[in-house]
Image (cartoon, rainbow, N blue to C red):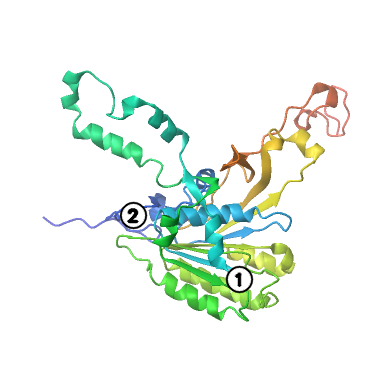
Amino acid sequence: MATSKPWTSSFSRNLATVPSSAPGLKYGPNGTIFISSGIPDLDKILGGGFPLGSLVMVMEDAEAPHHMLLLRNFMSQGLVHKQPLLYASPSKDPKGFLGTLPTPGASKDDKSRDRDPENEHGLRIAWQYKKYFGENQHHFDSNRDVKHEYCHDFDLRKPLEKHFISGQHIDCVSILDSPNLAALRDRCAPFLAQFPRNDSSISSAGRISIQSFCAPQCKYSNMEWDMLSFIRSLRSMIRSSNAVAVVTFPPSLLSPSFSRRWQHMADTLLSVRAIPDEDKEMAKLLTGYQDMVGLLNVHKVARINTQVPVILDATTFSIKLQKRRFLVLESLNQAPIDSSSGTSYGTSASCSGSSKSGALDF
């Protein structure tokens, strides 16, 4: 009896063989494989995380280092999953930045399970029915324990434990004194060669983090064409590997034309912005303004193995620190408007601005 071949087309991958699961990977539609950003809310917004083979670019705010929050969680998540990391920074000692990475904290579900004594031996049921559960109950408990392994809630107040850093393959590069980008390109090429992209099982995934790529203290900061060429080559190498690169850059230091080119090269494009401490007008418009530390804008979401555009319910989110420890993202909610202060924008019934009720006045 002839075996039937799996169905394939020019728009979908051959999914006859499901690759073996590796820690820190999530399988999505159309053969897309995600790795976590290190922020649970951001993974939900992006539909699962960062797809393997994608370039993520984050536009920095010159007034606040909020991009460092995204970068730290991204790097910590990879180290917890034992994924190799390449970190490039315009500082003299990039390894010192590893000491500021946050450690994974216990989630709410984990804490509730720890306080519940019934969960130590599974569900408390009548003894005569326990024989009918057996291995199935053990399998259910094991799946429940690994529920939060894909993405952790990182405690920003506690540094990452040393055993996550000491036994990992971590390559730190200083781009401060580099006259050009040839040295950084030579470090990225062999690193990405460790994770060839093929249809076989994936044993591990790589992560690249480049901080403040066009920082003014770098000697190549005025070579805009060379920096654009590097981003183009990095995207090409990333596309053929099982890795994700996150590059942060201050767009204010680039010319408008080159800034748009950089944004076009990104598969996933994000931007962060600080919030003034005493903005009374914004405090009236937004609920929970006093708890916000910044804003996150999602300009573009990666589309891998599909031509269907991603339509988000919202593109601007508030950055908050829950209990001053955990990074959370929330949609912006408009504060209710008091009747004494005037009508809202959605209640105007006249195109001419007249407040009298009646027929529409054009």
Is residue 332 shown left or right of residue 30? right
* Nearer to me, 116 or 18: 116
> Mark 1 Cα within 10 Å, few/some/many (few <14, many 20+)?
few
* Quarter of image, res 175: bottom right
* Nearer to me, 233 or 207: 207
Residue at 41% in and 59% down = 83
- Can residue 43 be seen here? The reply is yes
Residue 328 drawn above or below residue 11: above
> Mark 2 Cα within 10 Å, few/some/many (few <14, many 20+)?
few
Mark toward the start of the polypeptide (2 vs 1): 2
Residue farthest left in this picture: 1
| Residue linked to disc 1 | 92
- Can residue 305 be seen here? The reply is no
* Quarter of image, res 347: top right
- Foreground tag (2 vs 1): 1
Question: Residue 270 placed where, x, y %?
Answer: 61, 54
* Quarter of image, res 228: bottom right
Question: Residue 49 placed where, x, y %?
Answer: 48, 51
Question: Residue 102 placed where, x, y %?
Answer: 52, 50
Q: Which mark is residue 50?
A: none
User: In the rendered structure, which amino acid carries the disc numbered 1?
Assistant: Lys
Q: Which mark is residue 22?
A: 2
| CA distance separating discs 2 and 1 | 34 Å
Residue 191 drawn above or below residue 338: below
Question: Residue 309 placed where, x, y %?
Answer: 53, 52
The number of numbered discs placed on residues in the rendered structure image is 2
Q: Quadrant of the C terminus?
A: top right
Residue farthest front in this picture: 162
